[in-house]
Amino acid sequence: MIGIDSERDLSNEVLLRLNQSKRMDMKISVDITGISNCPVRDSNGNLLPFVWTRQSVCNEYDNATLLTREALQKHLQNFIDAGVRENQELLQKVNDPALLVDWVVRTAEYWERRYAEKRNEKYDISQTVFSAMSEIVFETVWPVLTTDYDFDEVRTKLHKKFQELDNASANKYHAHIMQHISSSATAQEKQLESFFWLHRGHNALVRLLFRADLTDLREHLCMLAGKLLQKKEVCNKPGTYASHRQRSDVLQEWCNCRRDFQMWCEQSAGDVRDQLLAAIDNEDWIFLVIDHTSVPLSLATIRHADVPLETLVECPHCQASYPLHKRQKLHDV
């Protein structure tokens, strides 16, 4: 029993850490796009594809998806209509029509939340934003860090950690995720499969620097990437900015960000290097480089906290039972 509980806790921890990586990536992309003064959301409040878009390993599967949003809405409507028909007599006796409204709204909200969780699993930072992130790392940030502050040790240790993953039991999180690959696959086939759900090379280094739990470093990187993206979207597109003065302002902001980053490095780069090395030494380092769009796990299965059952009261008119909220008084029933 202890072994089962331990395995269940590990499974839930892996899902939560994956979800944390995804939410961090979303926040980074939103911050960079906002700093670049580009639109982030549409009129309905949804993130634009420029910020957060579908990055699936298998595009053929996406194109062949049978369950559309319209089909799900039709099934939901049929479900609600059937529920109302089955309880027609009971609903007519209830004096408070809000009970029906609450049931319909909560049912629709649950369906929407579940659908959104499943569809959002393959979403990641857009290629436009990630290109800006990569460019500032390898053309602005990394040359400064390696030349003056010996950050090559970080890349070397990261590469060594990837090599250690050839041993199936080297990392408990990696071993747990490997269990979700087909049981009929050989050890070599499983190892090859795992190659696709971990970022490698330059991409791994970019994700590491942005995801690491170092707020100051992330803020400087987001500012640099945002101003570079603004320069690309504004200054490099003909006809967007007609005023030479406006273009000069954008370029000056980009130069100021680079200056501020270099000044910050003089005071904090040494500590940041040590913290990055410590983060790579931890067993959960793979969540700093994991590709949450390709990992063979469903984030929709995250185990939520258990909520205690609410007190049920009985309606004096129709004897129907429904939950009593803490703020509701008995004489209001």
Image (tube, helix red, strand yellow):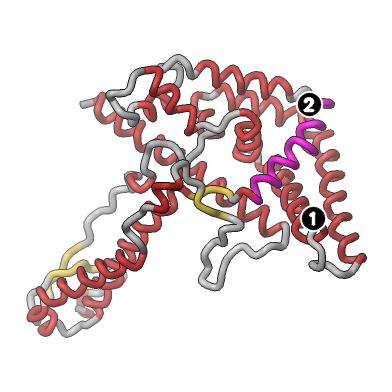
Q: Please name the residue that numbered disc 1 is placed on.
A: 231
Q: Is residue 136 magenta?
A: yes
Question: Residue 314 vs residue 217: left or right?
Answer: left
**Amino acid on which the number 1 mark rests in the picture:** Lys
Which badge, 1 or 2, comes first in the chain's sequence? 2
Q: Is residue 138 magenta?
A: yes
Question: Residue 166 vs residue 28: left or right?
Answer: left
Query: Which of the numbered marks, if any, corresponds to residue 253?
Result: none
Instruction: Note whether 322 is above or below 175 in the view shown.
Output: below
CA neighbours of label 2 inside 10 A, class few (<14), some (14 to 19), many (20+) = some
Q: Position of residue 323 (x, y in %)?
A: 21, 67
Q: Position of residue 154 (x, y in %)?
A: 68, 24
Q: Please name the residue that numbered disc 2 is placed on.
A: 146
Q: State the extent of the magenta-drawn residues as a range.
A: 128-148
Instruction: From the viewer's side, name the closer residue of 12 and 311.
Output: 12
**Amino acid on which the number 2 mark rests in the picture:** Thr
Identify the secondary structure beneath mark 2: helix
* Quadrant in which the C terminus is drawn: bottom left
